[in-house]
Amino acid sequence: MATTSQSSGNNGLVVIIAVAVIAILAVGTIFLMQDHRSGSERVGDAIEAAPQGLDKAADKLGDQAPADNVERNLDKAGDKVEKAVN
């Protein structure tokens, strides 16, 4: 019976390691994605950031990390949901 419990314990460890590797690859893929915003989206983001300072607005014109794009898209989705509810 000892070999059976060791075998199932090893299977659980393999599953945990596989899930961790997949999660790391997914996060890595998100952070390596390119910025596909159009010029008008970049200008719109810069205009929205202008009250925070011109340096932040200028940063919005350049390429952004995909995590920033995800955050921006979530904010836009939240705004759309809020408008739809009201």
Image (spheres, grey):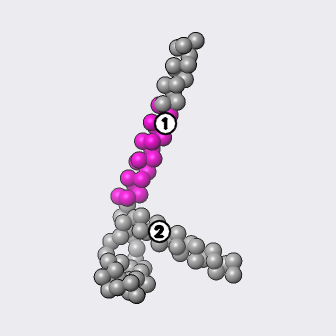
**Residue at 69% over, 77% down:** 85
Q: Quadrant of the C terminus?
A: bottom right
Residue 39 disc label: none
Image quadrant in which you'd find residue 32 = bottom left
Pinpoint residue 73: horizontal percent, then vertical percent: 50, 71
Instruction: Give the amino acid at mark 1.
Output: Ile
Image quadrant in which you'd find residue 4 = top right
Part of the protein shown in magenta: 14-32
Pinpoint residue 79: horizontal percent, then vertical percent: 58, 77
Q: Can you say whether 56 is above or below 10 in the image?
A: below
Residue 45 magenta: no
> According to the image, label 1 marks what residue?
16
Pinpoint residue 5: horizontal percent, then vertical percent: 55, 19
Does residue 24 show up? yes
Instruction: Give the amino acid at mark 2.
Output: Glu
**Residue at 35% over, 70% down:** 64
**Residue at 40% over, 73% down:** 37
The tag earlier along the polypeptide, 2 or 1, is: 1
**Residue at 36% over, 66% down:** 65
Pinpoint residue 18: horizontal percent, then vertical percent: 46, 37
Label 2 sits on a secondary structure element that is helix
Q: Can you say whether 4 is above or below 45 in the image?
A: above
Does residue 61 show up? no
> According to the image, label 2 marks what residue?
71
Label 1 sits on a secondary structure element that is helix
* Closer-to-camera residue (67/29): 67
Q: Can you say whether 19 is above or below 80 in the image?
A: above
Mark 1 surroundings: few (<14), some (14-19) or many (≥20) residues within 10 A = few
